[in-house]
Amino acid sequence: MQLNPYVIVILLSSIVILSYFFTVISKKTNIPSVLLLIATGIGIKYLATHYGFSNYNVEPIVRILGAVGLIMIVLEAALDLDVHREKLSLIRNSFFSALFIFIISAVGITFLLVYWLGEPIDRSFIYAVPLSIISSAIVIPSTSHLPEMKKEFIIYEASFSDIVGILVFNYMVMNKVLDFQSTLVFAGRIGLAVVISAVASLLLIYMLSKIEGVLKFFLVFAILSMVYASGELIHLPALLIILVFGILLNNSNLLVKGGLAKIIPIENLQSIQGLMKTVTAETSFLIRTFFFIIFGYTINLKVVIEPDVITIGTLIVMLLLTVRYIYLRLILKANLFPELFLMPRGLVTILLFYSIPVSKQLTNFKVGIIFYVVVLTSLLMMVGLMFFKKEKSEYLQSAEDTLI
């Protein structure tokens, strides 16, 4: 049974309009729009089943949208980051927050899966990695109403969490994980990625400053996507290139000086920064909309509410919350509310989960655990944002004194 092309256009347009209203509702109520999108996807699935349209394998679409969405979301975040000497402490604290919380969370989830499911430790760790990554796709759009210091901390932390998590995941899916030679090769790839990031970013910035006309963004995006996909194919941390490019472009006034200013006209770059931010935000919104709608379409509610799924999923979320509390409160020593609850899992978690090779998959792990953790952590973020009050200046002062 086939739909009329005009009906498809109407349905797709309706989804975009509905997502816009979800964004408005999210800003008014602090209910994450991702939950509304997932719920819509679940509803579409049941309607499709009722009318005989449910026999579609949408997993390849989820993977493609996830990969493109990851590029756009990290680029959108990077274009919002200002790098100054006085913010070095903030960047350092957010990096170590992402690193410490990721490592301890991954180790804890690994032993939980080994104990509860009786699975091998190396494969359990592969599954623990995606579950330990904060979703920048969910948390970054939710920080718009937070004070600037808190917003920047969350953006940096989520971006670093994505990069560290993807690096570790790429390492773990290599054939000889514990082989010394493979470790050296992977370390070399990281160094190569850093060099490529710097060179590619400078070339792209130069190209942007020289391109005539208005057709700039999607050409740059196509190049970034090609570099990212090529890097992923050879297990390079290509997401680093996206982050570096966005940060360098947004801080081009600090980069383009002296002789470099003669080659790259700084006034040309400044004129297109606003356009880049606008188009990136719009494109990210569109990709997020269809990704989480389709993700909701893939969810089987019967699998999510199984007793084992609820038990293991709840234990995982409790572990994530505990580790985050220990670092933010006891190590960073800051009353960072609502940052404690801003730890949603989402796009990267789902994307990496679908990327686990068949040879390294667990036999007793239920996919409902991933769905359950994504939803529960998003609900926790919603609760944290709902109870956060801007007028509580003691929270803000405590955070600023610690992060600066």
Image (cartoon, rainbow, N blue to C red):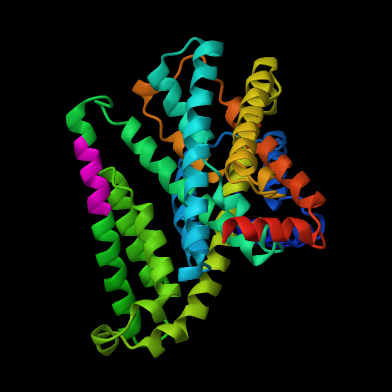
Front position in the image: 327 or 62 = 327
Residue at 75%, 47% (x, y): give it.
Answer: 384
Residue 333's spot in the image, x, y percent? Answer: 63, 45
Question: In this rendering, is residue 306 above or below 41?
Answer: above
Residue at 27%, 86% (x, y): give it.
Answer: 258
Magenta stretch contains residue 188 = yes
Q: Split into 4 quadrants, where in the image is the C terminus?
A: bottom right
Residue at 50%, 31% (x, y): give it.
Answer: 104
Residue 145's spot in the image, x, y percent? Answer: 72, 63
- The image quarter in which residue 374 lies: top right
Magenta stretch contains residue 322 = no
Where are the magenta residues, as a range? 184-193
Left or right for 108, reference 54? left
Front position in the image: 29 or 56 = 29
Residue 30's spot in the image, x, y percent? Answer: 77, 54
In the orientation shown, which residue stands out farthest toward the left?
181
